[in-house]
Amino acid sequence: MHALRKKRLSVVLFLLAGVALAVALTAYALRQNINLFYDPSQIAAGEAPVGARIRAGGMVESGSVVRDPDSLTVRFRVTDFQATVPVEYTGILPDLFAEGQGVVALGRLAPDGRFVADEVLAKHDEKYMPPEVAGALKSPSAQREGKE
């Protein structure tokens, strides 16, 4: 093999290795930042990973919001009308957060079954509902529950 061909081959192999490394690092970084959505039924059934960052959503159960008077900690339950999940959040809730409204919480599932949220998102008007929450609430039993 000629010296020029060896040099070209080594440059091409070096570039391919660099591109492969860049693709592998990008894929790894993206995998770490994926926040999968789980509804309360899936969380109650044990489908959600414990300790991994996930999104949980549903309706804030009426009468479930309890605020700690000494801190910004709020505890409430999120339901899809089939199962409920207790949520604990420390921080300032969005202005539109209310009982009976749709909510998506980002955080981690604790080993005791509590969902510890580090961010809470509330719907922005009376017609909007996060797509994941709307899909989770379209089950037949949820529709029967909502009509009563």
Image (cartoon, grey):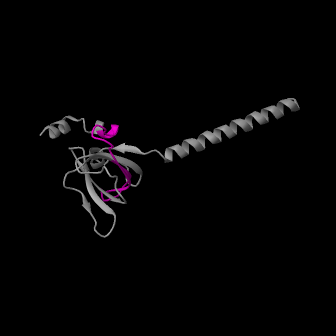
Q: In front: 62, or 80?
A: 62
Q: In front: 71, or 142?
A: 71
Magenta residue check for 107: yes
Q: Quadrant of the N terminus?
A: top right
Farthest residue in the left direction?
A: 148
> Where are the magenta residues, as a range?
104-133
Residue name at image x 21 percent, y 56 percent: 64
Magenta residue check for 82: no
Residue 47 visible to the viewer: no
Farthest residue in the bottom direction?
A: 70
Q: Quadrant of residue 127?
A: top left
In the depicted structure, whether residue 100 falls above or below residue 65:
above
- Does residue 65 appear left or right of residue 29 in this picture? left
Farthest residue in the right direction?
A: 3
Residue name at image x 28 percent, y 68 percent: 69
In the depicted structure, whether residue 76 falls above or below residue 12:
below
Residue name at image x 17 percent, y 39 percent: 146
Q: Quadrant of the C terminus?
A: top left
Residue 53 location (% of width, % of height): 42, 51
Residue 19 location (% of width, % of height): 66, 37
Report the number of discs: 0
Q: Quadrant of residue 87?
A: bottom left
Residue name at image x 83 percent, y 33 percent: 6
- Does residue 81 appear left or right of residue 88 in this picture? left
Residue 92 visible to the viewer: yes
Residue 96 location (% of width, % of height): 31, 49
Residue 68 location (% of width, % of height): 28, 66
